Amino acid sequence: MRLPPPVVALSTALALSAFVASPAVRLHDPCKVLTAEAFGRIMGYTASIDKTGSTATSCFYTGPAGQGGQFMIFTEVATAPQADAMLKRRGATPPAGSGLVGGMYREGTIVFSVSIRSTDQAKLQAVVAAIRRNLS
């Protein structure tokens, strides 16, 4: 008995799909979660992404006269106890007097950090809010 070509094609596709590994977690691209345009709009200047410093889990933003910031995703699959432990970790905020403000934050199972070259907590909170909106 000969099977029609569409059935053969469908059967082959289904058989091959069983061998293709699907990623367990869809990773967010930090530079897409918080674009340079959005970062700059919050900070009040034109910002760009430092492509040499940015990676699959972190994005570095640069602005005029040494201004800028950083957004890093530590994990996207933290359990509540893991996330709590990461958030309580020492060194989660920039050192006093560094000219930076920031910290570690959680949105669901995602734990991330943000630091900006500023002393304005309102700008930091606006950056964190933008990231949270885009991670949801």
Image: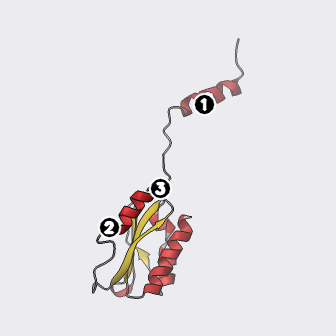
Q: Position of residue 113 (x, y in %)?
A: 39, 70
Estimate the spatial distance between the alpha carbons at disc 1 and disc 2, rounded to whole Å: 46 Å
Tell which tag, 3 or 1, sits nearer the viewer: 3
* Whether residue 35 can be seen here: yes
Examine the rendered structure and indicate whether residue 72 appears above or below residue 16.
below
Tell which tag, 1 or 2, sits nearer the viewer: 2
Q: Secondary structure at mark 3?
A: loop
Residue appearing at x 28%, y 84% in the figure: 96
Extreme residue in the front direction: 81
Q: Do the numbered discs 1 and 2 sit on residues whose CB atoms are within 8 Å?
A: no
Residue topped by disc 3: 27
Label 1 vs 2, first from the N-terminus: 1
Q: Which residue occupies the foreground of this view, 56 or 80?
A: 80
Q: Secondary structure at mark 1?
A: helix
Residue appearing at x 55%, y 34% in the figure: 17
Q: Quarter holding the C terminus?
A: bottom right
Amino acid bearing label 2: Arg
Estimate the spatial distance between the alpha carbons at disc 3 and disc 1, rounded to whole Å: 26 Å
Q: Position of residue 60 (x, y in %)?
A: 38, 72
Q: Is residue 127 left or right of residue 67?
A: right
Residue topped by disc 2: 89
Amino acid bearing label 3: Leu
Q: Is residue 36 left or right of residue 90?
A: right
Residue topped by disc 1: 14
Q: Secondary structure at mark 2?
A: loop
| Number of the label disc, if any, that sits on residue 63 | none
Examine the rendered structure and indicate whether residue 67 appears above or below residue 113.
below
Amino acid bearing label 1: Leu
Q: Quarter holding the N terminus?
A: top right
Examine the rendered structure and indicate whether residue 51 appears above or below residue 5.
below
